[in-house]
Image: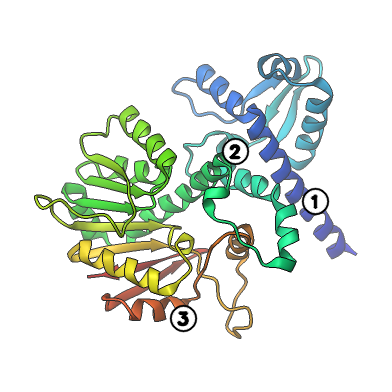
Amino acid sequence: MDQFNIFVRDNIVGYLTVILVGIGRRLGIFQYLYKKAISENIDKKIESVSFSVSELITKLDLNERYLDGWLTAAIEVGLIEIENNDTKLLKTCPYIYDFFIDSNNPVFLGAAYGSIYRIALQEDDVFKNFKTGKLISRAQIPKDIVMEGHRATARMGNTLENYFAKHFRQFQKNLKKEGKILEIGCGYGYNLLNWAKKYKKCGIIGLDIDEEAVNFTREQVLKNKLDERVEVLTISIEDYEIPKDKNKFDLILLNEVLHEMEMDDTFRKNVIDRLYLLLKEGGIVLIGESIIEDLFDPSRKPQLLEALHKWQEIGLTSKFYSEKSFRELIALTSFKNVELIKETYNSFWVLKK
């Protein structure tokens, strides 16, 4: 009975937290609290943000009945707590500012939760397709959901960079002095900007076929005054050619992109061979991907995050790899040096030329 109670409680809390965070982000509650915290705590570490019910009603034009329901549930799951009963003040619980409000924080989870919430809204379509097997392309997904996904994968890109820096220290040191980086499928630029700010002497090119995403990234590049060394192009990797007066790339990035490409292995094999041609001798391709082992593989271990990722993309034209099937794919390409690096819950592939 104790195990039953724990199971039920934890699952209700988890489910409700995703719903509350998703709605809170869509209503602009967390964004408002971020702006308020920044304006009131210049040069101070922010532990929590205080606010009143009437403040949110007035500032965000929210209905009192619905807001009261949201706050009641948010208190129960540990997002919000009462600061002062007499003055009817509330505040965010410890760590909630870092987890769900400050998008610049390394432990920020808001985009990931927001992505899960938005995709859950599409479950009706998923249900219907259990009979038909119909898939949809990414071009059919609403842009705000796509952006949530890109924000979430940017966190994975950050992790990818941390692992790269740890395992390839000399390569990283050289890259910080000079070099060229190419990102395939840069999307809305969240990951690209992270790398550009870290490798301040590198020329960086981002490629994507989504014109709206590329325009957004270009705006961010200009806003961050990176346009002298960062270029973003609306073009596929198959059509991209390095200008004759330019050098090949030291590093090529694919952050949660490979599984989104056309599902045909021949197409993907040709893309990877194309990367080989664009890479300098001694260069590296870093591939951040969810590795999802076969369902009945006897050596298969629990993969909660990977299972979540697979479920999120079940209705899309996606194809994931197990370690075995990915190695089989790379064996067909020009790359002869492939390494899988695993740490905690994350992993990435390294292809060396």
Which mark is in front, 3 or 2? 3
Assess disc 3: are there few (<14), some (14-19) or many (≥20) residues with their C-alpha within 10 Å of its C-alpha.
Answer: few
Residue depicted at 47% across the width and 37% down the height: 104
Rendered position, 126 above or below 322: above
Please provide percent x and percent y for residue 341: 40, 69
Q: Amino acid at mark 1?
A: Ile
- Which SS class for mark 2? helix
Extreme residue toward the right, this view: 1
Q: Amino acid at mark 3?
A: Lys
Given contact means CB atoms under 8 Å apart, are the residues at marks 3 and 2 in contact? no
Q: Earlier in the sequence, mark 1 or mark 3?
A: 1
Given contact means CB atoms under 8 Å apart, are the residues at marks 1 and 3 in contact? no
Residue 307 located left or right of residue 230: right
- Which SS class for mark 3? helix
Residue 342 located left or right of residue 225: right
Q: Which residue carries the number 2 mark?
A: 100
Work out whether residue 105 or residue 200 is closer to the camera in this orientation and state it: 200
Separation of residues labelled 1 and 2 (CA atoms): 19 Å
Q: Quadrant of residue 125?
A: bottom right
Please provide percent x and percent y for residue 70: 78, 32
**Numbered circles on residues, count:** 3
Which mark is in front, 1 or 3? 3
Which quadrant of the figure contains the C terminus? bottom left
Assess disc 1: are there few (<14), some (14-19) or many (≥20) residues with their C-alpha within 10 Å of its C-alpha.
Answer: few
Q: Which residue carries the number 1 mark?
A: 12
Q: Which residue carries the number 3 mark?
A: 324
Residue depicted at 26% across the width and 40% down the height: 230
Q: Amino acid at mark 2?
A: Phe
Q: Quadrant of residue 340?
A: bottom left
Q: Earlier in the sequence, mark 3 or mark 2?
A: 2
Assess disc 2: are there few (<14), some (14-19) or many (≥20) residues with their C-alpha within 10 Å of its C-alpha.
Answer: many
